[in-house]
Amino acid sequence: MTDIPLNGSEPAQRDGHFLDELAYRRDGLSPSERRVADYVLGNPQTVMRMSIAALAETVGVSQPTVLRFVRAVGLRNYPELKLQTGQSLASGTPYIHSDVLSSDTLDRVSEKIIDSSIYALTMLKRSIDLDALGRAIDILADAPRIDCYGTGAARMLALEAQQKLMRFGNPVVAYDDTHLQRLAAATLREGDVALCFSHTGMVRDTVIMAQKARECGARVVTITKPDTALARAGDINLAIDTHENTEIYAPMTSRVAHATLIDIIATAIALRGGPALFARLRSAKDSLSDLRILPEPPQSQRSRKPRA
Amino acid sequence: MTDIPLNGSEPAQRDGHFLDELAYRRDGLSPSERRVADYVLGNPQTVMRMSIAALAETVGVSQPTVLRFVRAVGLRNYPELKLQTGQSLASGTPYIHSDVLSSDTLDRVSEKIIDSSIYALTMLKRSIDLDALGRAIDILADAPRIDCYGTGAARMLALEAQQKLMRFGNPVVAYDDTHLQRLAAATLREGDVALCFSHTGMVRDTVIMAQKARECGARVVTITKPDTALARAGDINLAIDTHENTEIYAPMTSRVAHATLIDIIATAIALRGGPALFARLRSAKDSLSDLRILPEPPQSQRSRKPRA
DNA sequence: TCCAATTCTGTAACTTATCTACATCGACTT
DNA sequence: AAGTCGATGTAGATAAGTTACAGAATTGGA
């Protein structure tokens, strides 16, 4: 029959990151099941193509034990284990558990770092608060003036936001200097927007900026970790919470998420502006053309855009 | 037997993007097989949990036809189809072909942009030249002085490289101003390194910087599109070539790839430095601690740091 | 238009994989 | 020292996937 299994009895099981879930549940399993779990965590690439018999034999347990393990981690049947393992692997999370090690070769290092960036983006996709994002875009699109605040690593984000948002015609500023920032925040008016960046949400200067901006009647959009001082100091927070496990490489992966979020905001504003804004974007870009070197043949690669 | 046939049709199958591959091969299939392909493309989420019998019946063909379809698209057996479909779905690249449209809702826009960033990283992972990267790291790790050049969007990358690399103790500079850049490039000496960023590889100023740096005897590492003026102007190029299909949102996705590459370089240098360098990184980070707001309880949340 | 060669598709038998029911073992309780 | 409960294994039933072969459809030439 066309009867699709898909019965809804699964406890937990957030889509995608099964290996996380598995690592989490590992300790609640029986000894034999735990051995299976360890093998799956260690050899996901292999497991996703293994039959239950092969897995059982490799680990050294019986097939029903493997099946019990499967059920114990919240899956319906064995094929589902292969599926979830494969998906979890594909969505770029193989190394998120393990930090970069001194013993790692260069290819391993680069793989791990890229994977963790991909993971951060996957998390962003899943956790993005569309409602808050929509409101932030509403505010930003209409703002007569936008100030971007951020220090340290977040300064780059502020600069980037400036560069992306200034194209829409309204004044957007990012300040290099903390003192200048303070002066600027004092001159904000009602309707203006302060855009505050921080990875940790705990940077004193940036929190103070947010507060000052609010005192002046400006609205404050923060892009930072939820439930932090900065998140609370603004009107709208766009939460970015990549569970950064290493301390040393701290803002590495969350920075990618921040930057992508800026892209989303800028794109959404551009789309809202309609064709007119599109045209303006294009002409802004063309204004840079004399800084470029011309490509050898005057090619027009794709003819895929019939009308503007 | 474990003997894999690997019959006539292309094995191909670059990891991850099976549905792309499928769409591409669709036209070369027989009519019945094409119907199967269409169903798979249209209902991947369902297919990945379907038995061959269920799929055959739903599409209205026989089981062997499904199996022939599987082989025709380069897969060994039917379970592999489920696996690949699932992975392709999980790896989050459904929208990479389609540009953002004016009619898109906000969630669609954000999904598309995030997906294209993920795609850029996947491409980076696949195309990274470990040999060139290794040589670049060798050079950078020993350089008495590093200058980071980049204008426009690439300026952010230069700044970011500065921030990441300066932690290792040697002087690293990024310049805001093109004139300053030129002056600086003239003072480079043998052994110094110029790190040049550009998305297009066609920015005149940056190419000139690279040439000047070379004239001074410095080595030039470029991070840009391969086979471009800038790529040719340096000693080592770390190629970043995300086939950016939209023009308006130009440096969006490749920027993520650039930034991640900087992370990789910085991490690799840190690892090479061994424990001593690690310690220095940590203390550099701690030097910022009085700029932070403490978490609510006055004592340090984590007991993971026995000494200050 | 017809015939043969080729390609496409389905039927049925076979092999492999997954699941269930029941049996055994061993640790802990009483 | 026997009972109970949880963990594990054995064996057979059911479902899934694969192969061999034969019938149907298509194509290209005579």
Image: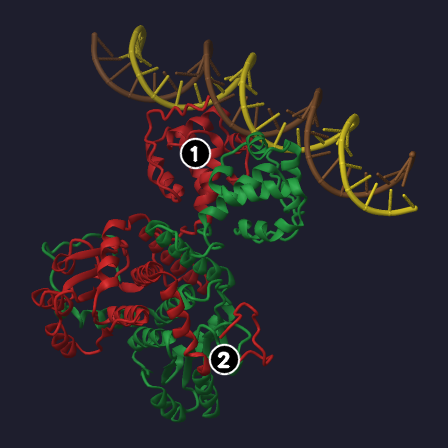
Chain colours: A green, B red, C yellow, D brown
Q: Tell me which corner region of the image, top left, top right, bottom left or bottom right, holds residue B33.
A: top left
| Amino acid found under the numbered disc labelled 2 | Leu
Mark 2 — on which chain does it sit? A
Number of labels in the image equals: 2
Q: Which residue lies under the disc numbered 1?
A: B35
Picture coordinates of residue B16 (x, y %)? 40, 44
Residue under the image location 35 percent in, 74 percent down: A161
Q: Residues within 10 Å of mark 1 (few under 14, many from 20)?
A: some
Task: In the rendered view, tell whether residue D11 sits above or below residue A73.
Answer: above
Tell me the distance, in whole angstroms, between the alpha carbons under discs 2 and 1: 54 Å
Which three-letter amino acid code belongs to the residue tagged 1? Arg
- Residue A131 in percent (x, y) is at 51, 70
- Secondary structure beneath disc 2? helix
Foreground: B225 or A285? B225
The residue under label 2 is: A230
Look at the numbered disc 1 and give the secondary structure of its residue. Answer: helix
> Relative to A32, does residue A265 appear above or below in the rendering?
below
